[in-house]
Image (spheres, rainbow, N blue to C red):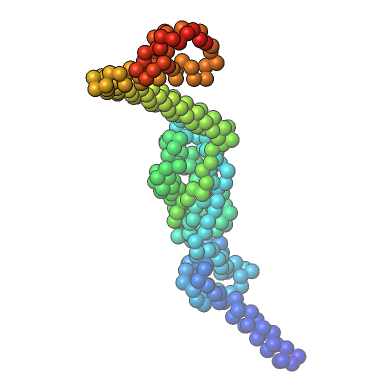
Amino acid sequence: MTRGPIVLIALAILAFLGLNSFFVVNEREQAIVLRFGEIRRVESEPGFYFKLPLTMFEMDNVQYVEDRLLRFDLDDITVQVSGGKFYEVDAFATYSISDPRRFRGQVSGRIELAEQRLRTRLDAALRRVYGLRGFEAALSEERAAMMREVRDELRPAANELGLQIEDVRIRRTDLTQEVSEQTYNRMSAERLAEAERLRARGQEAARRIRAKADREVVEIKAAAQRDGQVLRGEGDAERNGIFADAFTRDPEFFEFYRSMTAYLQALEKSGTTMVLSPNSEFFRYFGTSSGNVPASQGTGQ
């Protein structure tokens, strides 16, 4: 038998052992080196590392775990606040694997098992924190304090699994359908009551304004009537004074003017036939300019 095949087989074995003696860790992962199922060491820095070959004999196995920030979500849970009402809440937590040895020992290095346990603890923490507060707390500035309280309550359970909780956030806090309808009806009733109060105050103000305006109208009319009567009295007095002055200056002309005014008022557009004696006092100025009726004038129409 030639030595060529033996050399090739030896080289192949050496190459296989050489390749199985090294492993690579990148910046996003950590490596747990196991020997016969027990943790020998953990490599967290990126680089090339040596291990014993013959993985099929469990001499040295390498299990990779994440070395970056991870996240899991908790959706559509119903929590009850202290007043008895209910919210629908969505939340999530971010975490990292801080202790790979403990992480391997508790959940065999499986993220899905770790997150399953954390979801149960996060659900319980959310229910407790919401249950200690009233209806408005999750919608106010107190929400940030609630998230920190949930985070701090979740951290001990995460540390037992070799994890570090970085943050907890509440993504959504909505009223349940029943509570939403109740809240809408209550707010609607409050708005209607407020509208009625505003309407009643407006009507009362309108009545006050109308009463004040009516009072001012009466006062203005009374003042106008008073002023009108005063002016009419002053006008009548002035007219009478003028008549008196005219009478004293020329009594005959004054009598003539008064008679002409009487003729105008009695005969103008009246269509009335008057049968009077020419010698009557009414026609005294129809005879002569002095107002004396001629003796020869007879009776006429």
Q: Position of residue 96 (x, y in %)?
A: 48, 59
Q: Residue at x 44, y 56 (%)?
A: 166
Question: In the displayed structure, would residue 11 be above or below residue 219?
Answer: below
Position of 80 compared to 262: left or right? right
Q: Position of residue 101 (x, y in %)?
A: 48, 60
Q: Residue at x 44, y 10 (%)?
A: 296
* Viewport quadrant of the N terminus: bottom right
Q: Residue at x 49, y 48 (%)?
A: 170
Q: How many marks?
A: 0
Q: Report the front residue among 35 and 200.
A: 200
Question: In the displayed structure, would residue 62 be above or below residue 87?
Answer: below
Q: Report the front residue among 289 and 137.
A: 289
Q: Quadrant of residue 235?
A: top left
Q: Report the front residue among 135 and 11.
A: 135
Q: Position of residue 208 (x, y in %)?
A: 37, 24
Q: Quadrant of residue 5?
A: bottom right
Question: In the displayed structure, would residue 91 be above or below residue 29?
Answer: above
> Among all residues in the image, which is located at the extreme right?
1
Question: In the displayed structure, would residue 42 be above or below residue 281?
Answer: below
Q: Position of residue 99 (x, y in %)?
A: 45, 59
Q: Report the front residue among 297 and 87.
A: 297
Q: Residue at x 48, y 67 (%)?
A: 42
Position of 251 compared to 23: left or right? left
Q: Is residue 77 visible?
A: yes
Q: Is residue 35 visible?
A: no
